[in-house]
Image (cartoon, rainbow, N blue to C red):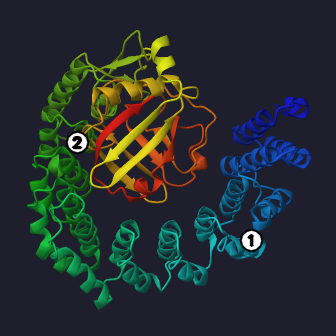
């Protein structure tokens, strides 16, 4: 690749070569050193902004992936510092160059000697903290000193305020409680919810406990689809900050008609070590609540609660079956557990859904842990005493079926858009990348046109990272029955990119995620099949549990 880069005439190809050189898995310091030198040479010879972007992307990847083999050299750090400077703003890619450069610098630090590293990059981080690009400022927060973080809790951008608040707690700063207490009134809900979460460490503050108390007792909006979040987060924080008060109000959450509040009740009960509450929630009507209770019980009670775990194996939710099987690993109750595990395995295999793989694999592991001989058939599939397929011995998923590509659909979807309506919030549109990911776009379009996504939710919301939705069970483990192959193209995971969620190679089950910020570590790891055209402000408002009203495919 280095040889090709020296003669390649197309800047886009040179940039792809540079990024790939940075991403290769080097096992020796000499290899990483050679790769770095190639990238430095490519930057020096660069004829365009595209060349600069490629070289910086390569160095960011090299520093992140091969840091343990060989840290970036002083020469590379000097280049990154120059690229991160505000003066590096150039054309449309200037901000991306600065983001990648500051990301690489922040990630290259030596945790054993942070003072020396701050002396090296402190001036760059200080400048980045006031950069005109909000994402540059956000990344700078990860290396910023407390004084800068405190100032940034009032930044105009919520992604910067969120990161500043999070880093104050990560650095265990004395001002964390005061800053969090102020931020619970932030105009952006995601920042306010983080602030409530962080009050968990503020039990010695009467003001903080009083604020949590107000949030858990004021349930006037908790019955609305978007009104339960503050009370839920406050309860979880209260369980640590003021356990006695949390115990007093826990009942109104365990009895809520909103299953998400009961999930948070299980999390609070775990912190309170309330086994009786967890056992009751393990019999809940909703499998997401059961999963949260079982995971907490397995840590609190261990195999004393094996009868509860065994009871979960007859449920339909793959997430709770997986949690129960994991909890049964090494069980002393072999005589009752093994028949139940085998029966669950038989049932899942008979259903024939690819995406029960995680549950099947957990069952197989539980059976192995108690000495059940799992035979391997000619196809590499594991079979237990019930002769049921449990998944591959390497832990990989069953091979996904090919998408039904046809010429008519490819012509129809040559330049398509998807319009997604979120109930009670608004609409955003995606440009679908048929050239980058044809099978994925066709699968998404077919499912959308069949109404698959209508009424499903965004069940996972991680501010400053991604939102994820499209699960028929509102969780990570249940989506469309068939797995889809990864299509890892050239489009990066920048803010607004839409990808397919997976749990290993080729395990996408039509759940989608949207990048809320640039996430370079996801590049070429997850399929990108679309990019937001308009309505990113709608995406920014999405909360856990928000409903996808409908998805329309537009010509």
Identify the element where label 2 is drawn. helix
Query: Residue at coordinates 27% horizontally, 31% vertically from top-left?
Result: 451
Position of residue 514 measured from the top left corner of the image (x, y, whole percent): 46, 46
Considering the image in quadrants, where does the N terminus appear? top right
Q: How many marks?
A: 2
> Which residue position holds label 1?
124
Relative to residue 256, is residue 546 depicted above or below?
A: above
170 vs 444, left or right, is: right
Asked which secondary structure carries label 1, the reply is: helix
Residue placed furthest toward the top: 378
Q: Residue at x 26, y 79 (%)?
A: 212
Q: CA distance from mark 1 to mark 2?
A: 47 Å
Residue farthest bottom in this picture: 206
- Quadrant location of residue 131? bottom right
Which image quarter: residue 117?
bottom right
Q: Nearer the viewer, residue 192 or 432?
A: 432
Q: Residue 494: tell me if it is visible.
A: yes
User: Where's residue 102, x and y in %?
Assistant: 69, 62
Looking at the picture, how far across and down is residue 108, in whole percent? 70, 60
Camera-side residue: 252 or 423? 423
Q: Earlier in the sequence, mark 1 or mark 2?
A: 1
Circle 1 or circle 2, nearest the eye = 1
Residue identifier under label 2: 320
For the C terminus, the quadrant is top left
The image position of residue 348, as x and y in percent, is: 23, 25
Camera sees residue 502: no
């Amino acid at each position: 690749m280095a040889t090709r880069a020296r003669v390649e005439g197309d800047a886009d190809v040179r940039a792809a070569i540079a990024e790939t050189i940075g991403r290769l898995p080097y096992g020796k310091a000499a290899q990483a050193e050679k790769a770095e030198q190639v990238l430095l040479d490519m930057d020096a010879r660069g004829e365009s902004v595209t060349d600069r972007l490629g070289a910086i992307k390569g160095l960011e990847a090299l520093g992140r992936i091969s840091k343990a083999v060989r840290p970036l050299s002083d020469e590379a750090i000097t280049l990154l510092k120059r690229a991160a400077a505000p003066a590096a703003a150039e054309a449309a890619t200037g901000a991306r160059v600065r983001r990648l450069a500051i990301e690489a610098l922040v990630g290259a630090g030596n945790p054993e000697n942070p003072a020396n590293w701050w002396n090296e990059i402190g001036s760059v981080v200080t400048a980045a903290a006031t950069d005109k690009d909000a994402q540059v400022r956000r990344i700078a927060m990860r290396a910023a000193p407390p004084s800068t973080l405190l100032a940034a809790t009032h930044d105009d951008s919520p992604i910067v305020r969120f990161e500043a608040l999070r880093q104050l707690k990560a650095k265990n700063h004395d001002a964390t409680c005061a800053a969090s207490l102020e931020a619970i009134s932030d105009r952006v809900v995601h920042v306010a919810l983080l602030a409530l979460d962080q009050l968990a460490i503020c039990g010695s503050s009467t003001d903080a406990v009083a604020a949590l108390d107000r949030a858990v007792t004021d349930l006037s909006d908790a019955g609305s689809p978007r009104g339960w979040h503050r009370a839920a987060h406050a309860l979880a924080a209260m369980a640590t900050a003021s356990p006695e008060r949390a115990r007093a109000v826990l009942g109104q959450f365990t009895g809520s008609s909103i299953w998400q509040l009961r999930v948070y009740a299980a999390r609070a009960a775990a912190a309170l070590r309330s086994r009786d509450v967890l056992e009751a929630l393990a019999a809940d009507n909703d499998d997401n609540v059961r999963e949260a209770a079982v995971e907490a019980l397995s840590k609190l009670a261990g195999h004393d609660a094996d009868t509860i775990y065994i009871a979960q194996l007859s449920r339909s939710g793959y997430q709770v079956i997986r949690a129960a099987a994991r909890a049964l690993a090494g069980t002393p109750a072999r005589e009752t557990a093994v028949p139940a595990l085998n029966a669950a395995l038989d049932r899942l295999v008979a259903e024939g859904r690819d995406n029960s793989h995680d549950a099947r694999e957990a069952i197989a592991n539980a059976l192995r842990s108690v000495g059940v001989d799992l035979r391997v058939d000619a196809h590499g599939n594991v079979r237990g005493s019930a002769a049921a397929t449990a998944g591959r011995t390497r832990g990989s998923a069953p091979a996904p079926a090919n998408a039904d590509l046809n010429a008519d659909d490819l012509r129809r979807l040559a330049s398509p858009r998807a319009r997604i309506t979120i109930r009670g919030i608004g609409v955003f549109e995606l440009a679908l990348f048929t050239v980058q990911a044809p099978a994925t776009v066709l699968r998404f379009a077919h499912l959308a046109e069949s109404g698959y996504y209508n009424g499903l939710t965004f069940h996972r919301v991680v501010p400053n990272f991604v939102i994820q939705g499209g699960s028929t069970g509102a969780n990570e483990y249940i989506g469309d029955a068939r797995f889809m192959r990864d299509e890892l193209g050239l489009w990066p995971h920048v803010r607004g990119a839409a990808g397919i969620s997976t749990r290993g190679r080729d395990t996408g089950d039509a759940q989608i995620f949207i990048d809320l910020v640039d996430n370079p570590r996801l590049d070429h790891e997850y399929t990108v099949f679309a990019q937001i055209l308009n309505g990113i402000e709608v995406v920014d408002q999405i909360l856990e549990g928000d409903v996808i009203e409908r998805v329309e495919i537009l010509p």
